[in-house]
Structure formats: structure tokens, C-alpha cells
Image: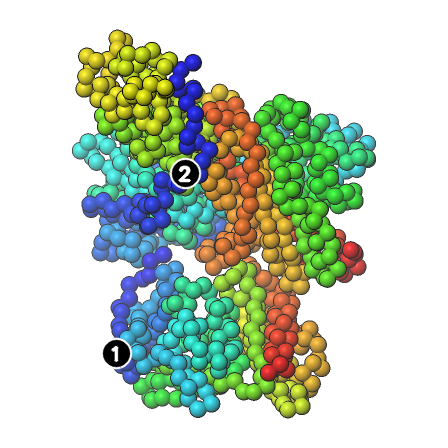
């Protein structure tokens, strides 16, 4: 057995402080807007004020005349420059939805980019943008995706019925006998409102074209620098090695920055037509107008149960709004909602139908757990079913949650579950709460006219999925002659602490002190190729890449040390930055001494051992996906007079395998949970009936703040998955599990009123309306 | 989100400031803390060729006892009001309303005069000024004058101030014995503009009957409002004679054009406004009874 596999972990599993924090917390991060290049110009977009209109003409004369304006581009100028436009994650050959850089002929949502002004500074660019005269012929918009399939108008003429794509399992009729004969069935249409990723750093890039060398350098706010490079090379017809993409800090992505969008295309195209580097930093209004929506969807969800409450079948007919210009092709991920609808339960039969529908609103983009609605629909439905059956929702779940002895198991839609612990996380969360005590407290409170509620959500989640861009990940480790270690990985951290975890894993893999390890990420010119942050993959994949690479170096270090110390390689252990022989205190070499031999004294190397201490390795995922799971449990008090919801506790028990760093795991869960809470109670990317967005600033788009969010409590179950270290993904789960738990908690508080929540967001007004209706019906009980 | 070009002026005193306003005309705007104006400029919802900054006008800052009133300079920040022991002692309603304004970063820059002159119908200070019958002291090239708060708020974001007139100070009546005060507001999140709110003052006579009372409403119309018919219905009655819910109901039967937006319909605003009045009334009466 080689040393690489036997060294005990010293840092993995511990709460190592984040290496990113000193610079970020003292305000010394480098985001796109911090990048300043000599002679840099500034871009600003002219955007459509209408949801749908024909562009009859664009007059840029007056704008061009403004002092300091360098250029004003329209679709005519930029769009013909596109050579190829497709995403590596999706592939070239799918029937992708349209995605022009600037609007061509027709604008399709409020915020659709129509022209690009380039000026000496952003102020001038915005002044000039007001002088661009666009002659619009208004057309009737298709605002409501839910009725878009019957609409007379088409968002894109080439898509009949406004359908972007459909994917389905078995015809639901085949399950009719089960539903017809079941002792109990539940069926609800559940609606979720549009909300969005809202990274605190908005989108943006600086593109610097060097005509003399034919090189493009891009500083980008991105989750995947290598994808930006691939995309840019294809877009402009450049050789990939002529494009360099650099990112240092990205202030949040959550899916919105997984791939370049239309504005990025425009800046890339325009940068070759202007003299100087070109910066575009999106402002908040633009981000809320045009960076993309998510979560706008509904489903007709059904379940059948036997007399004991065991699930017999589950079926979902799901429809999502993809807006006008979804990114990426929405049909690829569409069926996941259906495939995962059975969730962590014993569901003998199940099927789904899924449909993606265009509308004249901002395009759908990936958002932390893009299939999240499977959990919303299922968990909300289960609570309604329990209430209707007169059963405790916890008891109903206990009866149906998968046990470890039933695994591995393929769910009725074909999902191959393994290494999950839904029942364990469920019980752990209930224990952390003391469920029985809460129910008693709830009863006492009700007697006083106060309404407390508890809700749960248990889900399973495929992480680290193997898709074209994501199947492998590389690392280069260079041990310097001083014995200090540099580890290079593709990066793409948008706040997920990969710098910290990479340093931890490398220190362990080489048996060195963590202070002696540095990581370099986010620059395509110097890091190995990698897919970046997405699909909850970074932990597992970079761990694999580091392990592959480090094992080569461990073997070399061990061989050199054994040769120098006159012992056999099996006797050497690597620890504390030393190669040493246990029980022989004099037989020790520092890593610096080994490195000196490796670099400067090749004559002292054992035969067949390469000089230098630098290696690159590439990890290939062992499983098509790694399953993670969690239970969220939320308690709240509802003021039924005003409809105000106060969250009391939010407990998350999760199983992401062994934790590389519990603080990082909990940070990921916290961020996602807060987004989930926001999605239920506050955030709404709303449009009016004419297709005008009405939440375009933080006055109207309400993010939860520290005053609205309770302390989040964590429980951990650590079951290894089929990957390096047994690590599973944890980046997205918080945003999946939190929303149903919050909805169910509010619904539970309102149970005495017989109120049923099937439409999000849950606003104070919606609660007052539910309570009022119940009181009118005279159904108040309990 | 960059403002259109403007010329910046920083006069030394109030007279110079109003002289500038008169000379520059309607294209000029006063800027104090800038907490409402700057976002409007950045979004280009408002465009002015000239900004006249009050930051050098030290005469507009401070808290002073003047007879039966407490004078607060218009350029005094909300944070300074919050820290003032004089305000806590003499104008409890103002003191209690202040922490509800935005967040502390906003209160560090936002001013009393700015809030009242900006006249946002959902803001706390205009309703407090109205409920307390504050006196508003102004200066223009035509000289100084004092305006009652009643009648000052003329419409959405508009006031009785002439374009070249500057609000310099606000005098709030000092609290009297056997009085009570409360402010209640409902906002989607802590720090947001209120969906609906109520600022209540009540004074009892020796017999424990309502000597006078005022109910200021905010977020419930194009301007801050007084629930005058509720006040009339209450005057002379026993403090606990009308149930608070009834006070709320009467108060909210008055507003005629309750706003409706993404966060709340007019119906809901009216409902929650009545709840806020009831809660504020109950607390104010309790304080007056206990005083």
C-alpha cells in the first residue's frame, strides 16, 4: 500500500478558517468592477421598455455626437460577428433555443438589449443611451406562461404553442387503476412565483482584445473561467489558446454565472471593434431586469395511498416558464423535476410530464437546485395529504421514507439512489427540535390564540453529475524548491470556499502544514482545464483531482527520501512537512531537502525517478452522480391578524458524506436556506399584465436580511458516497430543502383555519386572505 | 444607474441657499442626507441640473428647547434625533418613530427636514409631525415664516413649500402630563417603508377622559393623514370606552385613496392599517393612564 493512501487526515474534517476571508472581509477582494485597465472604455446597454415590439428603426446619430462616446452598436453591427454559439455543458448539436446577442427585429421582454453604447466612462455612456432613438411598433405580449400554449401570439415564430420543449415518462393513464382504487388520493395544483439568484456582485466582464497578437483577455464574474474561454473562442472564431480568462473573486453566482449570457456575447463582440479594453458591469436594475429568472412554474401533482398511508403512486404534470431567452437550453434539465418527484420515499409507481413554455419575460437561468420544484410539489402535497387523512405529517413521512436496508434502489422514474440516509436525517432533525415538545407548545399557544407551526422537507439530490463539461477535473501541484506548495485548479469560486478546501486537501495529501500550501485558481492561462462551479461538484471533483496528482508526488518524494536515507520506501511516512521513518528520529528529511534533491541534485535521485516535484493529474468521476440528502425543519409563529410570519427555528440535518470542512458545509447550507426562505416569504420577480417588471430595485425585490432569518441549526449524518473521500455535493441543497419546510410550517400554523397553501409566495396579505376565507366558511377548529 | 450631469452647489448659510434656489429656478433641488434623492437621481427617475447641498448649514442642525416646544434643525440627522435625550424626554412619539426609519446606515445620513420635505406618504416623520401638530419653520428670499403641519403635505411627494423655500426647522410640542404616545407600523421586512402605520398621541383630563387625541396615518394615502373623524368620535369619551379595534375601524373608514402595489392591495393596507391604529391606540392610552 502506498503512502498516499495511508496518511491520516490532519485538516480534512476540521473547521479550518477560510483562506479567502482575510482579503474578502477587509474589503480587498478583486471583483470585475475592481479591474482597471489602461485606456479602458465602458459599455452600457439600451434596453427595451416594452415586453414585445417590432423594431422599426434605430437612430444613433445623436448618441454618437456626445463627447466621449466611442461607438453605438446595434444588432446589425454585432450579431453577424457570431461564429458559433453553444455551451459545452449542453453540446453543439441540441435544438437549442434562440439567443441573439442584441435584439434583432423584435424585442421580446422588458430589458431586452437593443443597442450597446461604448464611452469613456459609464456616466457618459448612460447619458448617450438616453439619446438612442428606437422606433418600436408595439405587439401584444405573451406575459403569462401558464396560458401561453393557448395564446394567439408567439414569442418565437418557430415555436408553435410557445412550447420550448416537452419530456414525459409513462402516460399517466397507465396509473389510472392505482389512483382509482387507492384508499386515499390527493391532488393539487401548486404554483411557485418567479424569483432569482440575485448575486451581490452583478454580472460583468472586461474584454481586452489585442489586435497585434490576436489575443483576447477577459476578466469575468463567472463560475467557470474555462467555459467562458471555450465559449468566447467559439463565438469569435478564435483559437482557444488565444483566449485567456481571469477571475479572482466572484461575488456570488448561484447558477446565474455558470455560462456567458447575451450581454457577455455583446461585450466580447464589441471589444474587437473598439480601441481599448471594454468593461461592462451590470447595475442592480439591469440584474433584476435581464439576468434571468428562476422558479416560475406550477404542477398538477398527485399521490395515491393505501389505507395505512403507504404511498402507492405519484404523478406530476409540470410546466415551467422559460421566458424569452432561457440560458442554457431548458429542455435538458426540464425532466429532472419529474424524475425526482418521488423523492426519498418508497413510491412503487410513478410518472411525469414536463413542459417548458416561452413568455415575453426575462429568460430562465440556472438557479441553485434548478429542479427544486420537485421538492416543493411533493412536500407540500404530503402535508396536505396528511391533514386530509387526519394523520400527523411526520407519521406519514416516517411510514414512507426509504430505509438504508432498501438501498440501492431505482425510483419509479429511473433514478438510481444509493448511499442516502433520508430517514436518519429526518429523525435527527425531529430530535433536534423535540417534535413532541413542540406539538405540546403549539397546543398551549393555540389555546391563547397564538398560532405556531412546524414543517419539514426531506429530499434527495443528485450532485457531481457527469455531464460533458463536468466529467473530469484536473489539478497541478508544484512543490517549490523551498518545500512550499502551490496547487493549481480551475476554480470558479463564487463564494463556495474552494480555495480553503483545496488547501486543506492538499496539505493532507502531501503531509505538509497548511500554512505552506497556497492555491492558484481562476486563470485559464495557468490552471488545468476544469468545469468550474456548478451542479454541487467542486468538493468531490477537486478532491479527486488533488488525490490523483498528490499520489504521484507522494510516490516521488517517498522514493527520493528512501534513497537518501537508505531505507525502503515502505518505511517512509510523510507528515508535518517531513519525510521520515517512524521510530528512527535521525532518519528525517524536510520537504525542502527532498525538493532540493529533486530540482538541484539530479545525480542523487534514485534510478528511474523523475527530477522536480511538479505533477498534473486528472480525475475521472467514478459514478454518474453522487446522491446527497437532507431534512429541513422549520418552525414559525403566524400573526393571523396581520399575516406576519416570524420564523422561530430552522434546522437542517444533512448527509453530504464526510465533511472536508464543517464550517464550509454549514456556510453553503446557510446561504441556500436563506435564499429558500426568501423565495417563500419575500422575493418575487413580478410582472404586471402588460409584461412590465415591477420589482426592479431592492425596494421592491425583497431579499431576506439578518432580521428576518432565524439562527440556522445544523445536524450532520456522514455517509460516504461513491467518490474521493466519500465526499458528496452540498452547494445547492439548502435552496431546495428550505422552501417546502417554510411553506409547511406556515400551513401547519394555519391548520386550525383549514387553510391550504398552494400558491407562492406566502405574503402577509395571502395569509390574511386565507384566514379570512376560512373564517367566512366557519371552519375554524382547534 | 448613474445620475445625469448636474452642477453641485454648497452654500454657506440658509439665505444663500434660498438665493441660489431662486436664481436657479425649477431645475435646482435641495439635497440634505440624499437617502431618497440620490437613488432617484441614479435611476434617472429625477433629473436636476443643480443640486444645492445643505451640508455646510450648521444653523440647521441641533435640538433646542424653545418655550413649550422642542426645535429640531431640519438638517439634524435621524441618528442624532435617536441619540438625543431631549427628544426622548420631550417628544416621545418622535423618539419612538425614529428607529423605524430604514436602517442605521440610512439614519446616519437621513435628516429630519429631508424626510418631512420629501413627504413620502409611507414615511414616519411626516405622520409624526402631522399627529403632533408640529410647526414648520421655513425661509425663502421673501423671508422667514412658520407653517402648521396640517396643510403642509399637499400631495404625493409635494408640500406647501415654494420652489425657492427651504425647511429650516421643526418645532414639536413638548409632552404634557397624562399623555401617551405610540407608533406602530407594518412593513414586509424590518427597515422597509411601512405598508401601513399609525402614530398616536392621546392626552387625558383629570377625570381620565380623552382631552385630546391625534391619530396620524402613513402608507394609507397619497399623503400622511389624520384620522379626524375618529379623533372627533373619541374626544371627551372615557379612555377605554371604545375598544381599540373599533378605533382602528373608524380611523380606516376615512382614507379615500389607499394605495395598492406589489406588496399590498388597498384592501389589505386598510385592514392592516386598522390593526396598527388599534395597537398604537391601546399602547398610547395605557401610557396616558399610567402617567
The one nearer the camera, B262 or A430, is A430
Q: Mark 2: give few (<14), some (14-19) or many (20+) Cα within 10 Å.
A: some
Which of the numbered marks, if any, corresponds to residue A16? 2
Cα gap from disc 1 to disc 2, whole angstroms: 55 Å
Q: Residue at x 40, y 41 (%)?
A: A17
The one nearer the camera, B213 or A648, is A648
Residue holding disc 1: B12
User: Splitting the image into 4 quarters, where does residue B188 fall?
Assistant: bottom right
Residue A777 drawn above or below residue B180: above
Q: Residue at x 46, y 74 (%)?
A: B119
Residue A751 location, x and y as percent? 73, 52
User: Splitting the image into 4 quarters, where does residue B139 fall?
Assistant: bottom left
Residue B122 location, x and y as percent? 51, 69
Can residue B277 be seen here?
A: no
Quarter of the picture holding the C terminus of chain B: bottom right
The one nearer the camera, A540 or A711, is A711
Q: Residue at x 47, y 42 (%)?
A: A667
Residue under mark 2: which chain is it in? A
Amino acid at each position: 500500500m502506498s503512502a498516499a493512501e495511508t496518511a491520516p487526515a490532519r485538516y480534512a474534517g476540521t473547521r479550518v478558517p477560510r483562506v479567502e476571508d482575510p482579503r474578502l472581509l477587509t474589503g480587498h477582494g478583486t471583483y470585475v468592477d475592481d479591474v482597471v485597465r489602461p485606456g479602458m472604455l465602458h459599455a452600457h446597454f439600451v434596453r427595451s421598455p416594452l415586453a414585445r415590439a417590432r423594431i422599426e428603426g434605430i437612430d444613433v446619430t445623436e448618441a454618437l455626437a456626445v463627447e466621449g462616446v466611442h461607438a453605438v452598436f446595434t444588432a446589425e453591427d454585432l450579431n453577424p460577428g457570431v461564429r458559433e454559439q453553444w455551451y459545452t455543458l449542453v453540446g453543439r448539436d441540441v435544438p437549442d433555443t434562440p439567443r441573439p446577442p442584441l435584439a434583432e427585429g423584435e424585442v421580446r421582454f422588458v430589458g431586452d438589449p437593443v443597442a450597446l453604447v461604448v464611452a469613456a466612462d459609464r456616466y457618459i455612456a448612460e447619458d448617450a443611451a438616453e439619446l438612442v432613438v428606437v422606433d418600436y411598433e408595439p405587439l401584444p405580449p405573451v406575459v403569462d406562461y401558464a396560458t401561453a400554449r393557448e395564446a394567439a401570439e408567439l414569442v418565437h415564430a418557430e415555436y408553435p404553442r410557445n412550447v420550448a420543449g416537452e419530456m414525459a415518462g409513462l402516460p399517466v393513464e397507465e396509473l389510472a387503476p392505482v389512483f382509482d382504487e387507492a384508499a386515499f388520493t390527493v391532488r393539487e395544483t401548486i404554483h411557485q412565483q418567479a424569483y432569482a439568484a440575485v448575486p451581490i456582485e452583478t454580472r460583468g466582464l472586461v474584454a481586452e482584445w489585442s489586435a497585434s497578437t490576436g489575443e483576447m483577455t477577459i476578466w469575468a464574474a463567472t463560475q467557470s473561467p474555462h467555459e467562458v474561454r471555450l465559449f468566447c473562442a467559439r463565438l469569435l472564431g478564435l483559437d482557444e489558446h488565444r483566449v485567456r480568462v481571469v477571475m479572482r473573486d466572484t461575488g456570488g453566482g448561484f447558477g446565474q454565472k455558470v455560462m456567458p449570457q447575451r450581454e457577455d456575447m455583446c461585450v466580447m463582440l464589441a471589444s474587437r471593434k473598439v480601441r481599448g479594453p471594454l468593461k461592462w458591469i451590470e447595475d442592480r436594475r439591469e440584474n433584476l431586469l435581464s439576468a434571468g429568472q428562476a422558479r416560475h412554474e406550477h404542477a398538477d401533482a398527485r399521490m395515491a395511498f393505501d389505507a395505512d398511508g403507504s404511498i402507492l403512486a405519484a404523478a406530476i404534470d409540470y410546466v415551467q416558464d422559460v421566458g424569452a431567452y432561457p440560458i442554457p437550453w431548458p429542455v435538458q434539465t426540464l425532466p429532472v423535476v419529474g424524475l425526482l418527484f418521488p423523492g426519498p420515499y418508497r413510491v412503487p409507481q410513478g410518472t411525469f410530464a414536463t413542459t417548458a413554455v416561452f413568455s415575453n419575460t426575462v429568460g430562465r437561468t440556472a438557479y441553485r437546485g434548478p429542479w427544486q420544484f420537485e421538492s416543493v410539489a411533493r412536500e407540500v402535497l404530503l402535508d396536505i395529504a396528511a391533514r386530509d387523512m387526519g394523520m400527523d405529517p411526520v407519521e406519514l413521512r416516517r411510514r414512507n421514507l426509504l430505509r438504508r436496508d432498501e438501498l440501492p434502489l431505482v425510483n419509479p422514474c429511473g433514478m438510481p439512489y444509493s448511499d442516502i440516509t433520508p430517514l436518519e436525517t429526518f429523525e435527527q432533525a425531529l430530535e433536534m427540535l423535540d417534535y413532541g415538545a413542540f406539538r405540546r407548545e403549539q397546543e398551549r399557544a393555540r389555546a391563547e390564540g397564538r398560532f405556531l407551526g412546524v414543517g419539514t422537507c426531506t429530499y434527495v439530490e443528485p450532485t457531481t453529475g457527469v455531464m460533458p463539461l463536468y466529467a473530469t477535473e484536473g489539478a497541478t501541484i508544484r512543490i517549490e524548491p523551498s518545500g512550499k506548495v502551490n496547487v493549481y485548479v480551475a476554480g470558479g469560486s463564487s463564494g463556495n470556499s474552494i480555495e480553503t478546501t483545496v488547501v486543506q486537501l492538499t496539505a493532507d495529501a502531501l503531509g505538509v502544514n497548511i500554512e505552506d500550501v497556497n492555491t492558484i485558481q481562476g486563470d485559464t492561462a495557468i490552471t488545468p482545464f476544469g468545469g468550474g462551479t456548478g451542479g454541487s461538484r467542486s468538493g468531490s471533483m477537486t478532491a479527486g483531482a488533488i488525490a490523483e496528482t498528490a499520489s504521484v508526488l507522494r510516490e516521488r518524494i517517498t522514493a527520493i527520501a528512501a534513497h537518501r536515507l537508505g531505507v525502503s520506501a515502505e518505511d517512509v511516512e510523510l507528515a508535518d512537512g517531513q519525510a521520515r521513518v517512524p521510530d528512527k528520529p535521525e532518519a528525517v528529511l524536510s520537504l525542502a531537502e527532498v525538493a532540493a534533491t529533486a530540482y538541484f541534485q539530479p545525480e542523487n535521485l534514485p534510478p528511474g525517478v523523475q527530477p522536480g516535484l511538479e505533477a498534473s493529474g486528472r480525475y475521472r468521476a467514478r459514478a454518474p452522480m453522487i446522491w446527497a440528502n437532507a431534512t429541513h425543519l422549520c418552525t414559525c409563529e403566524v400573526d393571523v391578524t396581520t399575516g406576519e410570519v416570524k420564523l422561530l427555528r430552522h434546522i437542517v440535518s444533512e448527509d453530504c458524506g464526510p465533511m472536508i470542512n464543517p464550517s464550509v458545509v454549514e456556510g453553503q447550507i446557510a446561504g441556500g436556506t436563506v435564499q429558500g426562505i426568501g423565495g417563500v416569504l419575500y422575493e418575487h420577480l413580478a410582472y404586471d399584465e402588460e409584461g412590465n417588471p415591477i420589482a426592479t430595485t431592492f425596494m421592491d425585490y425583497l431579499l431576506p436580511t439578518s432580521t428576518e432569518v432565524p439562527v440556522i441549526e445544523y445536524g450532520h449524518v456522514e455517509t460516504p458516497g461513491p467518490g474521493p473521500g466519500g465526499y458528496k455535493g452540498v452547494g445547492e441543497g439548502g435552496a431546495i430543502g428550505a422552501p417546502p419546510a417554510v411553506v409547511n410550517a406556515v400551513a401547519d400554523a394555519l391548520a386550525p383555519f383549514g387553510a391550504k397553501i398552494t400558491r407562492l409566495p406566502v405574503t402577509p396579505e395571502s395569509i390574511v386572505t386565507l384566514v379570512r376565507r376560512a373564517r367566512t366558511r366557519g371552519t375554524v377548529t382547534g | 444607474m448613474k445620475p445625469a450631469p448636474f452642477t453641485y452647489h454648497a452654500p454657506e448659510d440658509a439665505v444663500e441657499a434660498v438665493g441660489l434656489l431662486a436664481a436657479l429656478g425649477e431645475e435646482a433641488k435641495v439635497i440634505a442626507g440624499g437617502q431618497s434623492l440620490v437613488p432617484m437621481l441614479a435611476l434617472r427617475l429625477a433629473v436636476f441640473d443643480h443640486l444645492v447641498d445643505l451640508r455646510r448649514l450648521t444653523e440647521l442642525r441641533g435640538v433646542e428647547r424653545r418655550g413649550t416646544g422642542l426645535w429640531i434643525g431640519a438638517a439634524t440627522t435621524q441618528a442624532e434625533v435617536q441619540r438625543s435625550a431631549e427628544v426622548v424626554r420631550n417628544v416621545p412619539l418622535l423618539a419612538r418613530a425614529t428607529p423605524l426609519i430604514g436602517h442605521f446606515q440610512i439614519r446616519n445620513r437621513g435628516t429630519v427636514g429631508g424626510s418631512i420635505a420629501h413627504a413620502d406618504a409611507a414615511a414616519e416623520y411626516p405622520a409624526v409631525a402631522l399627529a403632533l401638530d408640529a410647526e414648520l419653520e421655513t425661509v425663502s428670499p421673501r423671508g422667514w415664516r412658520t407653517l402648521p403641519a396640517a396643510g403642509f403635505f399637499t400631495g404625493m411627494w409635494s408640500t406647501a413649500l415654494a420652489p425657492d423655500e427651504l425647511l429650516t426647522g421643526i418645532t414639536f410640542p413638548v409632552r404634557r402630563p397624562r399623555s401617551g404616545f405610540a407608533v406602530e407600523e407594518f412593513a414586509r421586512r424590518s427597515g422597509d417603508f411601512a405598508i401601513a402605520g399609525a402614530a398616536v398621541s392621546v392626552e387625558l383630563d383629570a377625570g381620565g377622559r380623552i382631552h385630546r387625541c391625534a391619530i396620524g396615518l402613513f402608507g394609507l394615502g397619497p399623503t400622511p393623514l389624520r384620522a379626524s373623524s375618529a379623533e372627533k368620535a373619541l374626544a371627551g369619551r372615557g379612555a377605554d370606552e371604545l375598544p381599540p379595534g373599533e378605533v382602528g375601524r373608524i380611523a380606516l373608514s376615512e382614507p379615500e385613496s389607499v394605495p395598492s402595489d406589489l406588496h399590498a392591495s388597498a384592501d389589505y393596507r386598510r385592514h392592516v392599517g386598522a390593526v396598527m391604529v388599534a395597537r398604537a391606540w391601546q399602547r398610547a392610552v395605557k401610557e396616558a393612564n399610567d402617567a
